Structures are given as C-alpha cells and as structure tokens.
Image (cartoon, rainbow, N blue to C red):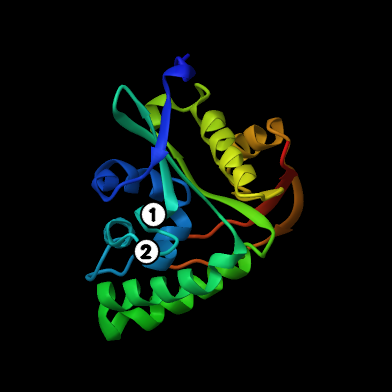
C-alpha cells in the first residue's frame, strides 16, 4: 500500500508531457484511438502529446493536475465545467487542424463529435472529472481515490456542487471505485462506434453531490 500522505498534487506543467500523456491516454484508450489514430499520419498519443504541450483546451496542460510520489508523476486528471465548452471546442479544432492538416482533420473532428454522443461534454453547473490516469504499477493502492478526492476538493473551491464523470461499461473495476466514493449511475449510453483503430465501449454517467 502506497503511503498516500506522501502524494503531492499540483497544477500540471508542459514539462510533464512525457509522464502525463500516456496516463491520459490510458483513461480511455479505445475512444482516443478511435478518434485520433490515423494510419500513416499520427497515433492518438502523438496528438495528445502535442495538445498537452500546446496548453490550451481540454487536453492541454493548463486543464490538468498531476500527482507526484517522490517527485515522479504517477497520476493525472482534469476537472472542468460546462462554461469551458466554446473555448475547448475552438482549441481542439485548432490543434486538430495543425496536427493533421486539412486532409485528415475533418475526419478526426467528425469522429470526435460521434464520441460526444456517447460521452457528452459537461453542462453548466457540473464539475466534470476526466482523463483520470494512474501509473499501472501503482493501481489499486489508493492513488486513484486520492486523485478524485483532490479534484472534488478543487471543484468545491470553485463553488461547484455536482461532481460528474463517465466510466466505460467495460471497466467494472473503475465503476466500483467510483461507487465506493459515492457516485451513482444516472444514465447509460450504448455505443456502436468502431474502426480499425479502436472500438468505443458504452459508457455510464455517474454523479454525486459535493460533500
């Protein structure tokens, strides 16, 4: 069991990309690969790295916190609300166009919009927890819970009361953790999205009130 008091959470920096981006990708690899992997052009990891370093939008370093153990990044996550919708959309469109070019960008954007039917962006009033990733060798040792507690605390400090996240139907272990922390399923959205790069599972939206 990891000594959780030794965990330190802080705002992410662009220098965290090498450690943080694989953890972000691990939070939903099938969906990320479905949207962002373009054979012969880019992997999903390559795009997420570029977007993280860019800093803006949903995938930028400014939208994330990281957890450290002895100075090593072992966890990452994001918490944001519906008021970010327009700025995040514009940032993503710019990043996708810059990364993929005019030939491939439209396809990436269309796939992203399809995934949003399964995993909708947050509405106003929500504090949405996303990109929750923990180093594989440290999973099951309380770090995920500490990460969620930290994100909830930051949401409360921002006067948000509805804590919301989505979990893949193929990930019962994560759902069990969220249920343990007081989250309850409010809706389940099936998915038939698939291509050669990834098959997007159905997702369940879970919510709890702060406190």
Q: Position of residue 81 (x, y in %)?
A: 59, 59
Q: Residue at x 43, y 54 (%)?
A: 63
Residue 107 at x, y percent in the picture: 40, 80
- Gap between marks 2 and 1 measured at Cα: 7 Å
Q: Which mark is residue 172?
A: none
The C terminus, quarter of image: top right
Q: Is residue 150 visible?
A: yes
Left or right: 93 as drawn, with respect to 189: left
Earlier residue among tags 2 and 1? 2
Q: Nearer the viewer, residue 66 or 176?
A: 66
Q: In this orientation, which residue lies closer to the viewer: 119 or 154?
A: 154
The answer to whether 160 is drawn above or below residue 144 in the figure is below
The residue shown at (33%, 59%) is 55
Marks 1 and 2: in contact by CB < 8 Å? Answer: yes
Residue 211 vs 138, above or below: the answer is: below
Which structural element holds mark 1? helix
User: Where 164 sits versus 151, above or below?
Assistant: below
Question: In the visual, does 130 lie left or right of 178?
Answer: left
As displayed, is residue 71 above or below residue 198? above
The residue furthest bottom is 102
Please state the horizontal and vertical placement of residue 34, each as a whole percent of the image: 43, 64
Circle number at residue 62: 1
Graded by Cα atoms within 10 Å as few (under 14), some (14 to 19) or many (20 or more), the crowding at tag 1 reads some
Q: How many marks?
A: 2
Residue at screen point 35% across, 53% down: 61
Q: Residues within 10 Å of mark 2 (few under 14, many from 20)?
A: some
Element assignment for label 2: loop
Give the numbered dot on residue 56. 2
Residue 132 horizontal/vertical position (percent): 49, 43
Q: Work out whether residue 196 can be spotted.
A: no
* Residue drawn at x 31%, y 22% as measured from the top left: 70
């Amino acid at each position: 069991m990891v000594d959780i008091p030794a965990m330190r959470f802080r705002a992410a920096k662009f220098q965290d990309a090498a450690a943080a981006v694989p953890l972000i990708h691990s939070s939903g690899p099938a969906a990320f690969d479905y949207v962002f992997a373009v054979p012969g052009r880019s992997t999903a990891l390559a795009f997420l790295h570029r977007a993280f370093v860019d800093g803006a939008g949903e995938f930028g370093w400014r939208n994330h916190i990281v957890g450290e153990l002895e100075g090593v990044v072992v966890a990452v996550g994001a918490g944001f609300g519906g008021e970010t919708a327009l700025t995040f959309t514009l940032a993503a469109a710019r990043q996708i166009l810059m990364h993929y070019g005019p030939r491939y960008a439209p396809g990436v954007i269309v796939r992203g919009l399809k995934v949003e039917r399964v995993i909708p962006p947050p509405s106003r009033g929500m504090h949405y927890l996303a990109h929750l990733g923990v180093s594989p060798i440290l999973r099951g040792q309380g770090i995920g819970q500490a990460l969620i507690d930290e994100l909830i605390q930051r949401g409360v400090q921002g006067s948000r009361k509805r804590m919301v996240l989505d979990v893949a139907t193929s990930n019962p272990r994560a759902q069990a953790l969220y249920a343990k922390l007081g989250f309850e399923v409010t809706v389940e959205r099936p998915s038939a999205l698939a291509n050669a790069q990834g098959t997007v599972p159905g997702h369940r939206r879970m919510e709890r009130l702060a406190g």
